[in-house]
Image (cartoon, rainbow, N blue to C red):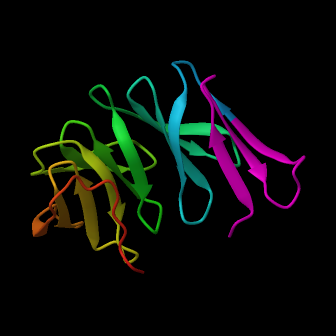
Amino acid sequence: DGSRVAFAFDDSAVRVRSTADAAAIIAELAWQGGGAYFVTFSADGKRLAMGTIDSMVRVWDVEASRELAGIALSPPGAVRASFSRDGTRIVTAGADGAARVWEADSGRELDVLAGHTKEVQDAVFSADGSMIATASRDQTVRIWNAADGSARAVLEHGDEVNSVAVSP
């Protein structure tokens, strides 16, 4: 809804501020273990996921300023993460060449989307939650069935693919 903005720092903190009132601090999310390098909101704005330098993806309840789940990944961790539209799942794009699907509130791994041969740069759910698209340095975009992790399509490109989006 555009009412909040989150920003990450190297000091092990993410701050959430109001866009309507510059002085209004909604939340300060702090942890031990180093800075964050990406943040992303769930569609309803109630949850926030962040990738941290210690190879974690941390999921927070913004209103309560409480960490819900800590998802430990192999170093160097996730490059990017995205929530499903309903906020129940997160997909992470990994430097190990795989995307992974997680239960947002518990951090339980639900699926591994393997097939890329180089770092996955981005991973997103379709608006209806039925598909996941991944972009990789292996010069492909892959489309996956979000329900069972099966591959639906491989789209080849002549160079590394940095980002992907699925039309709503």
Is residue 2 in the magenta section?
yes
The verdict on residue 20 being magenta is: yes
The residue drawn where x is 38% and y is 28% is: 55
Image position of 148 (left or right of 129): left
> Residue 4, position in %: x, y?
72, 57
Q: Is residue 141 above or below residue 53?
A: below
Q: Position of residue 109 (x, y in %)?
A: 27, 44
Q: Residue furthest front?
A: 158
58 vs 24, left or right, is left
Looking at the picture, does residue 59 appear above or below residue 5? above
**Based on the displayed image, in which of its 4 quarters is residue 15 positioned?**
top right
Q: Is residue 50 above or below residue 158?
A: above
Residue at the far top in the pictured view: 33
Specify start and end residues of the magenta stretch as a single range. Answer: 1-28
Q: How many marks?
A: 0
Residue at image location 66% in from the left, 47% down from the top: 6
* Left or right of 108 on screen, residue 96: left
